[in-house]
Image (cartoon, grey):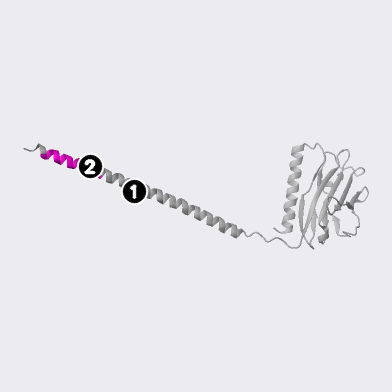
Amino acid sequence: MSYPAQERRSGVQLVSALLLMLSLSGCSSMDVIVANSINALNGTTVKISCVFTSCYKMDVTKFAMNWTYQETRNDTQELFMTYYKKRGMVPLRSERFGERVTFAGNLDKNDLSITLLNVQLEDEGIYNCYVRNPPDRIQGHGIIQLNVVTELPPPRDSTIAVAIGASVGGALALLILSMVVVKCLRRHRKQELISEEKMEEEGKLEAEGVAEEGTKQP
């Protein structure tokens, strides 16, 4: 699967999860929906999605949001994007990302997603999406593991699966046919044996009848 297709599938999954969370929770508190893990090809562009749900409309005077990065869970978090009341989502220049991070979401839709340009091997790590939307008391937190790969996995050849399925199906059909033929032969053989036994029995009865007629003659 190509990365654009994978990104579209991830987006659909996030929207589906968002709708499911809203329908099940009845909007009782804040929830942050993210992909647990994302794979990105070295040198390409990747979108890291983060969407939140809340019972309350966003108040720009109280809303707060931060994106941070850490190599592992035990490392210090590096702040690289934050929200300002008057400027909105603003990327912070960092030695790690430079100007390669841009905001790709939509605040009106509670979408806080970002885009990372020219992905490097050292970009692999944990990305944290923190959200506060008072009067919600709970701070939302999404954790995404970004994995950077140097080559795409080989595409799955569906023709092989079809061929295997056809072979298995053919073998199964042949086995069923063989069982039917064997069963028919056994039934036919059984009928022949019954016929032979019946003929022998009739022959015996006929011979006995002839013998009795012979003894009755003067």
20 on left or right of 118: left
129 on left or right of 205: right
Magenta stretch contains residue 204: yes
Residue at 76%, 52% in the rendered image: 37
Furthest residue to the left? Answer: 218
x, y percent for residue 176? 46, 50
The amino acid type of the residue labelled 1 equals Arg
Label 1 sits on a secondary structure element that is: helix
- Packing grade of label 2 (10 A; few <14, some 14-19, many >=20) is few
Alpha-carbon span between mark 2 and mark 1: 20 Å
Does residue 171 lie above or below 58 as drawn? below
Tell me the quarter of the picture where residue 60 sits: top right
Residue at 36%, 46% in the rendered image: 187
216 on left or right of 182: left
Label located before the other in sequence (2 or 1) = 1
The amino acid type of the residue labelled 2 equals Glu
x, y percent for residue 74? 85, 50
Residue at 79%, 57% in the rendered image: 46
Residue at label 1?
Answer: 189
Magenta stretch contains residue 193: no
Q: Tell me the quadrant of the picture where the N terminus can be found.
A: bottom right
Residue at label 2?
Answer: 202
Compare residues 214 and 54 and report the one nearer the observer.
Answer: 214
Residue at 84%, 47% in the rendered image: 108
Q: Name the chief secondary structure element in magenta.
A: helix
Label 2 sits on a secondary structure element that is: helix
Q: Which residues are magenta?
A: 199-214
Q: Tell me the quadrant of the picture where the C terminus can be found.
A: top left
Tell me the quarter of the picture where residue 59 sits: top right
